[in-house]
Amino acid sequence: MNETKIRELQGIANQLRCNVLEMIGVGKAGHWGGSSSLAETMAVLYFHTMRVDRHNPKNPERDRLLLSKGHAALIQYAALCELGYFSREELTKVKSLNGLLQGHPDLTIPGIEAVTGSLGQGLSLGVGMSLALRLDKNPARVFVIMGDGEQSEGQLWEAAMAAANFKLDNLTAFIDWNKIQATGRTDDIFSIPALDKKWSAFGWEVLTVDGHNVASIADGIEKAKAVKGKPALIVLDTIKGKGVSFAENTATYHNGMFDEAKFAQAAKELAALKEAI
Ligand SMILES: Cc1ncc(C[n+]2csc(CCOP(=O)(O)OP(=O)(O)O)c2C)c(N)n1
Protein backbone atom coordinates (compact mmCIF):
# COMPACT_ATOMS: atom_id res chain seq x y z
CA MET A 1 0.00 0.00 0.00
CA ASN A 2 1.50 3.36 -0.97
CA GLU A 3 1.95 6.34 1.37
CA THR A 4 -0.92 8.30 -0.18
CA LYS A 5 -3.36 5.47 0.44
CA ILE A 6 -2.06 4.97 3.97
CA ARG A 7 -2.58 8.67 4.74
CA GLU A 8 -6.03 8.59 3.18
CA LEU A 9 -7.15 5.61 5.27
CA GLN A 10 -5.62 6.99 8.47
CA GLY A 11 -7.40 10.28 7.76
CA ILE A 12 -10.68 8.38 7.45
CA ALA A 13 -10.00 6.54 10.73
CA ASN A 14 -9.41 9.91 12.43
CA GLN A 15 -12.68 11.24 11.02
CA LEU A 16 -14.54 8.14 12.23
CA ARG A 17 -13.29 8.82 15.77
CA CYS A 18 -14.53 12.42 15.48
CA ASN A 19 -17.95 11.13 14.38
CA VAL A 20 -18.10 8.80 17.40
CA LEU A 21 -17.19 11.62 19.78
CA GLU A 22 -19.89 13.79 18.19
CA MET A 23 -22.45 11.02 18.68
CA ILE A 24 -21.54 10.49 22.34
CA GLY A 25 -21.53 14.22 23.12
CA VAL A 26 -21.55 15.66 26.66
CA GLY A 27 -23.25 14.03 29.63
CA LYS A 28 -24.44 10.91 27.82
CA ALA A 29 -23.11 7.38 28.16
CA GLY A 30 -21.52 6.02 25.00
CA HIS A 31 -19.12 3.25 24.01
CA TRP A 32 -16.01 5.26 23.22
CA GLY A 33 -13.44 2.61 24.25
CA GLY A 34 -14.42 -0.34 22.07
CA SER A 35 -15.47 1.91 19.19
CA SER A 36 -12.24 3.84 18.93
CA SER A 37 -10.12 0.68 19.06
CA LEU A 38 -11.77 -0.32 15.77
CA ALA A 39 -11.39 2.96 13.85
CA GLU A 40 -8.53 1.81 11.60
CA THR A 41 -10.14 -1.58 10.94
CA MET A 42 -13.43 0.04 9.95
CA ALA A 43 -11.58 2.48 7.69
CA VAL A 44 -9.74 -0.35 5.92
CA LEU A 45 -12.78 -2.63 5.62
CA TYR A 46 -15.28 -0.05 4.37
CA PHE A 47 -12.94 2.20 2.36
CA HIS A 48 -10.47 -0.30 0.94
CA THR A 49 -11.37 -3.99 1.23
CA MET A 50 -15.10 -4.53 1.07
CA ARG A 51 -17.34 -4.36 -1.94
CA VAL A 52 -20.30 -2.30 -0.74
CA ASP A 53 -22.74 -0.11 -2.62
CA ARG A 54 -24.61 2.58 -0.72
CA HIS A 55 -26.89 3.14 -3.73
CA ASN A 56 -27.93 -0.50 -3.55
CA PRO A 57 -27.34 -1.59 0.07
CA LYS A 58 -28.93 -5.00 -0.58
CA ASN A 59 -26.84 -5.81 -3.67
CA PRO A 60 -26.60 -9.63 -3.39
CA GLU A 61 -22.87 -9.55 -4.17
CA ARG A 62 -22.01 -7.07 -1.41
CA ASP A 63 -19.54 -8.16 1.25
CA ARG A 64 -21.11 -8.46 4.70
CA LEU A 65 -19.72 -6.99 7.92
CA LEU A 66 -21.19 -8.22 11.20
CA LEU A 67 -20.24 -6.42 14.37
CA SER A 68 -20.62 -9.22 16.89
CA LYS A 69 -19.47 -6.81 19.63
CA GLY A 70 -22.56 -4.79 18.79
CA HIS A 71 -22.08 -2.29 21.63
CA ALA A 72 -19.41 -0.66 19.42
CA ALA A 73 -22.11 0.25 16.87
CA LEU A 74 -21.09 3.91 16.88
CA ILE A 75 -17.91 3.20 14.93
CA GLN A 76 -19.88 1.28 12.30
CA TYR A 77 -22.44 4.11 12.09
CA ALA A 78 -19.54 6.55 11.72
CA ALA A 79 -18.29 4.66 8.67
CA LEU A 80 -21.71 4.12 7.12
CA CYS A 81 -22.40 7.84 7.49
CA GLU A 82 -19.14 8.76 5.75
CA LEU A 83 -20.11 6.41 2.91
CA GLY A 84 -23.47 8.18 2.60
CA TYR A 85 -25.82 5.42 3.80
CA PHE A 86 -27.68 8.07 5.82
CA SER A 87 -27.38 11.78 6.50
CA ARG A 88 -25.03 13.36 9.04
CA GLU A 89 -28.11 14.67 10.82
CA GLU A 90 -28.77 11.10 12.01
CA LEU A 91 -25.54 11.21 14.03
CA THR A 92 -27.00 13.94 16.21
CA LYS A 93 -30.13 11.86 16.88
CA VAL A 94 -28.34 8.64 17.81
CA LYS A 95 -29.97 6.60 20.58
CA SER A 96 -33.12 8.74 20.58
CA LEU A 97 -36.63 7.52 19.81
CA ASN A 98 -36.95 9.72 16.74
CA GLY A 99 -33.58 8.66 15.37
CA LEU A 100 -32.58 5.92 12.95
CA LEU A 101 -29.43 4.87 14.82
CA GLN A 102 -29.99 2.89 17.98
CA GLY A 103 -27.54 1.81 20.66
CA HIS A 104 -26.94 -1.54 19.00
CA PRO A 105 -27.02 -2.50 15.30
CA ASP A 106 -30.50 -3.03 13.91
CA LEU A 107 -31.71 -4.22 10.51
CA THR A 108 -33.71 -1.02 10.01
CA ILE A 109 -30.40 0.81 9.47
CA PRO A 110 -29.11 0.82 5.87
CA GLY A 111 -25.83 -1.09 5.63
CA ILE A 112 -26.35 -3.10 8.82
CA GLU A 113 -26.43 -6.86 8.20
CA ALA A 114 -27.42 -8.30 11.57
CA VAL A 115 -28.94 -7.45 14.92
CA THR A 116 -26.14 -7.85 17.45
CA GLY A 117 -25.37 -6.80 20.99
CA SER A 118 -26.01 -9.95 22.92
CA LEU A 119 -22.39 -11.03 22.79
CA GLY A 120 -21.34 -14.35 21.27
CA GLN A 121 -23.86 -14.56 18.44
CA GLY A 122 -22.29 -12.74 15.50
CA LEU A 123 -20.01 -15.56 14.42
CA SER A 124 -22.90 -18.03 14.27
CA LEU A 125 -24.77 -15.60 12.01
CA GLY A 126 -21.63 -15.21 9.92
CA VAL A 127 -21.25 -18.97 9.53
CA GLY A 128 -24.82 -19.26 8.29
CA MET A 129 -24.33 -16.41 5.83
CA SER A 130 -21.04 -17.83 4.55
CA LEU A 131 -22.66 -21.23 3.97
CA ALA A 132 -25.60 -19.64 2.15
CA LEU A 133 -23.31 -17.56 -0.07
CA ARG A 134 -21.27 -20.63 -0.97
CA LEU A 135 -24.42 -22.60 -1.83
CA ASP A 136 -25.49 -19.73 -4.09
CA LYS A 137 -22.03 -19.59 -5.71
CA ASN A 138 -21.98 -15.96 -4.62
CA PRO A 139 -18.42 -14.53 -4.42
CA ALA A 140 -19.25 -12.16 -1.56
CA ARG A 141 -17.24 -12.46 1.65
CA VAL A 142 -18.34 -12.31 5.28
CA PHE A 143 -16.41 -10.40 7.96
CA VAL A 144 -17.23 -10.74 11.66
CA ILE A 145 -15.72 -8.57 14.41
CA MET A 146 -15.65 -9.94 17.96
CA GLY A 147 -14.24 -8.57 21.20
CA ASP A 148 -11.64 -10.19 23.43
CA GLY A 149 -14.01 -10.11 26.41
CA GLU A 150 -16.59 -11.70 24.14
CA GLN A 151 -14.33 -14.76 23.80
CA SER A 152 -15.84 -16.13 27.03
CA GLU A 153 -19.15 -16.78 25.22
CA GLY A 154 -19.48 -20.52 24.53
CA GLN A 155 -21.61 -20.10 21.42
CA LEU A 156 -18.80 -18.57 19.44
CA TRP A 157 -16.62 -21.65 19.97
CA GLU A 158 -19.39 -23.82 18.51
CA ALA A 159 -19.48 -21.44 15.57
CA ALA A 160 -15.67 -21.63 15.31
CA MET A 161 -15.83 -25.43 15.07
CA ALA A 162 -18.65 -25.27 12.53
CA ALA A 163 -16.75 -22.80 10.33
CA ALA A 164 -13.69 -25.06 10.29
CA ASN A 165 -15.80 -28.17 9.73
CA PHE A 166 -17.47 -26.56 6.72
CA LYS A 167 -14.14 -25.19 5.44
CA LEU A 168 -15.53 -21.66 5.19
CA ASP A 169 -12.77 -19.81 3.39
CA ASN A 170 -15.19 -17.00 2.50
CA LEU A 171 -15.33 -16.07 6.20
CA THR A 172 -12.84 -13.81 7.98
CA ALA A 173 -13.23 -13.07 11.67
CA PHE A 174 -11.45 -10.49 13.82
CA ILE A 175 -10.81 -10.21 17.52
CA ASP A 176 -10.44 -6.64 18.73
CA TRP A 177 -7.70 -7.56 21.22
CA ASN A 178 -7.81 -4.37 23.28
CA LYS A 179 -7.27 -6.37 26.50
CA ILE A 180 -9.99 -4.57 28.45
CA GLN A 181 -13.68 -5.38 28.67
CA ALA A 182 -16.62 -3.60 30.35
CA THR A 183 -15.33 -3.32 33.90
CA GLY A 184 -11.64 -4.11 33.84
CA ARG A 185 -8.83 -6.09 32.27
CA THR A 186 -10.03 -9.10 30.31
CA ASP A 187 -7.28 -11.25 31.84
CA ASP A 188 -8.50 -10.42 35.38
CA ILE A 189 -12.19 -11.00 34.65
CA PHE A 190 -12.13 -14.16 32.54
CA SER A 191 -8.70 -15.14 31.36
CA ILE A 192 -8.39 -17.06 28.10
CA PRO A 193 -4.68 -17.51 27.53
CA ALA A 194 -3.15 -18.13 24.09
CA LEU A 195 -6.21 -17.11 22.11
CA ASP A 196 -4.28 -17.45 18.86
CA LYS A 197 -3.28 -21.05 19.63
CA LYS A 198 -6.85 -21.90 20.65
CA TRP A 199 -8.26 -20.62 17.38
CA SER A 200 -5.66 -22.43 15.32
CA ALA A 201 -6.39 -25.63 17.29
CA PHE A 202 -10.02 -25.11 16.28
CA GLY A 203 -8.91 -25.29 12.64
CA TRP A 204 -8.55 -21.62 11.72
CA GLU A 205 -5.70 -19.82 10.01
CA VAL A 206 -4.65 -17.20 12.55
CA LEU A 207 -2.62 -14.04 12.17
CA THR A 208 -1.99 -11.05 14.41
CA VAL A 209 -1.62 -7.49 13.17
CA ASP A 210 -1.15 -4.02 14.64
CA GLY A 211 -4.78 -2.91 14.76
CA HIS A 212 -3.86 0.77 14.51
CA ASN A 213 -1.73 0.39 11.37
CA VAL A 214 -3.93 0.58 8.29
CA ALA A 215 -1.31 -1.00 6.00
CA SER A 216 -0.85 -3.98 8.36
CA ILE A 217 -4.59 -4.48 8.65
CA ALA A 218 -5.07 -4.35 4.86
CA ASP A 219 -2.17 -6.75 4.36
CA GLY A 220 -3.59 -9.13 6.98
CA ILE A 221 -6.97 -9.14 5.26
CA GLU A 222 -5.38 -9.91 1.90
CA LYS A 223 -3.53 -12.85 3.48
CA ALA A 224 -6.75 -14.04 5.11
CA LYS A 225 -8.59 -13.87 1.79
CA ALA A 226 -5.89 -15.97 0.14
CA VAL A 227 -6.34 -18.85 2.62
CA LYS A 228 -8.10 -21.81 1.01
CA GLY A 229 -10.09 -24.58 2.69
CA LYS A 230 -10.46 -22.99 6.12
CA PRO A 231 -11.64 -19.76 7.75
CA ALA A 232 -9.19 -17.11 8.90
CA LEU A 233 -8.98 -15.11 12.10
CA ILE A 234 -7.16 -11.79 12.40
CA VAL A 235 -6.22 -10.77 15.93
CA LEU A 236 -6.14 -6.97 16.01
CA ASP A 237 -3.63 -5.80 18.61
CA THR A 238 -5.34 -2.59 19.71
CA ILE A 239 -5.67 -0.01 22.48
CA LYS A 240 -9.06 0.52 24.05
CA GLY A 241 -10.01 4.20 23.78
CA LYS A 242 -7.26 4.90 21.23
CA GLY A 243 -6.92 8.54 20.20
CA VAL A 244 -7.95 10.28 23.44
CA SER A 245 -5.11 10.10 25.97
CA PHE A 246 -7.15 10.04 29.21
CA ALA A 247 -9.50 7.40 27.78
CA GLU A 248 -6.84 4.97 26.58
CA ASN A 249 -6.26 1.61 28.28
CA THR A 250 -9.04 2.04 30.81
CA ALA A 251 -12.50 0.57 31.32
CA THR A 252 -13.78 3.98 32.47
CA TYR A 253 -14.79 4.93 28.94
CA HIS A 254 -16.09 1.51 27.94
CA ASN A 255 -19.53 3.13 28.18
CA GLY A 256 -18.64 6.29 30.04
CA MET A 257 -19.69 9.93 29.86
CA PHE A 258 -17.64 12.97 28.89
CA ASP A 259 -18.25 16.09 30.94
CA GLU A 260 -17.73 19.40 29.15
CA ALA A 261 -14.05 19.70 29.99
CA LYS A 262 -13.27 16.09 29.03
CA PHE A 263 -15.26 16.42 25.81
CA ALA A 264 -13.36 19.58 24.88
CA GLN A 265 -10.03 17.89 25.57
CA ALA A 266 -11.01 14.83 23.54
CA ALA A 267 -12.12 17.01 20.63
CA LYS A 268 -8.83 18.92 20.79
CA GLU A 269 -6.75 15.74 20.74
CA LEU A 270 -8.71 14.28 17.83
CA ALA A 271 -8.38 17.54 15.90
CA ALA A 272 -4.61 17.42 16.47
CA LEU A 273 -4.50 13.89 15.04
CA LYS A 274 -6.29 15.14 11.93
CA GLU A 275 -3.85 18.03 11.60
CA ALA A 276 -0.88 15.68 11.86
CA ILE A 277 -1.83 13.70 8.74
C1 LIG B 1 -24.41 -11.99 26.36
C2 LIG B 1 -23.96 -10.67 26.90
N1 LIG B 1 -23.49 -10.58 28.17
C3 LIG B 1 -23.08 -9.39 28.65
C4 LIG B 1 -23.17 -8.25 27.89
C5 LIG B 1 -22.77 -6.91 28.48
N2 LIG B 1 -21.55 -6.41 27.88
C6 LIG B 1 -21.58 -5.42 26.95
S1 LIG B 1 -20.06 -5.01 26.41
C7 LIG B 1 -19.32 -6.14 27.44
C8 LIG B 1 -17.84 -6.31 27.47
C9 LIG B 1 -17.31 -6.74 26.15
O1 LIG B 1 -15.92 -6.74 26.15
P1 LIG B 1 -15.13 -6.89 24.82
O2 LIG B 1 -15.70 -8.03 24.05
O3 LIG B 1 -13.69 -6.99 25.14
O4 LIG B 1 -15.49 -5.56 24.04
P2 LIG B 1 -14.63 -4.23 23.86
O5 LIG B 1 -13.69 -4.09 25.01
O6 LIG B 1 -13.86 -4.40 22.60
O7 LIG B 1 -15.62 -3.12 23.79
C10 LIG B 1 -20.27 -6.83 28.19
C11 LIG B 1 -19.96 -7.89 29.17
C12 LIG B 1 -23.67 -8.39 26.57
N3 LIG B 1 -23.75 -7.34 25.74
N4 LIG B 1 -24.06 -9.60 26.09
Image (cartoon, helix red, strand yellow):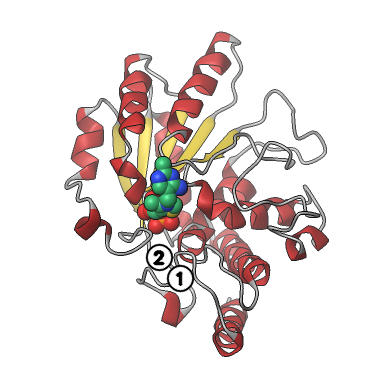
Mark 2 residue type: Lys
* Residue 97 percent location from the top left of the image: 76, 54
Q: How far is disc 2 from disc 1 in space, using C-alphas?
A: 9 Å
Q: Residues within 10 Å of mark 1 (few under 14, many from 20)?
A: many
**Does the residue tagged 2 have its C-beta within 8 Å of any atom of ligand 1?**
yes
Mark 1 residue type: Tyr
Q: Quadrant of the C terminus?
A: bottom right
Residue 241 marker: none
The residue where tag 1 is placed is: 253
Q: What residue is at 35 percent from the left and 30 percent from the top?
A: 155
The residue where tag 2 is placed is: 240
Q: Residues within 10 Å of mark 2 (few under 14, many from 20)?
A: many
Camera-side residue of 27 and 72: 27
* Residue 221 percent location from the top left of the image: 45, 41
Q: Is residue 46 left or right of residue 91?
A: left
Q: Is residue 138 left or right of residue 33?
A: right
Q: What residue is at 26 percent from the left and 25 percent from the top?
A: 203
SS class, disc 2:
loop
User: Do the numbered discs 2 and 1 sit on residues whose CB atoms are within 8 Å?
Assistant: yes
Q: What residue is at 46 percent from the left and 59 percent from the top?
A: 34
State which tag comes first along the sequence, 2 or 1: 2
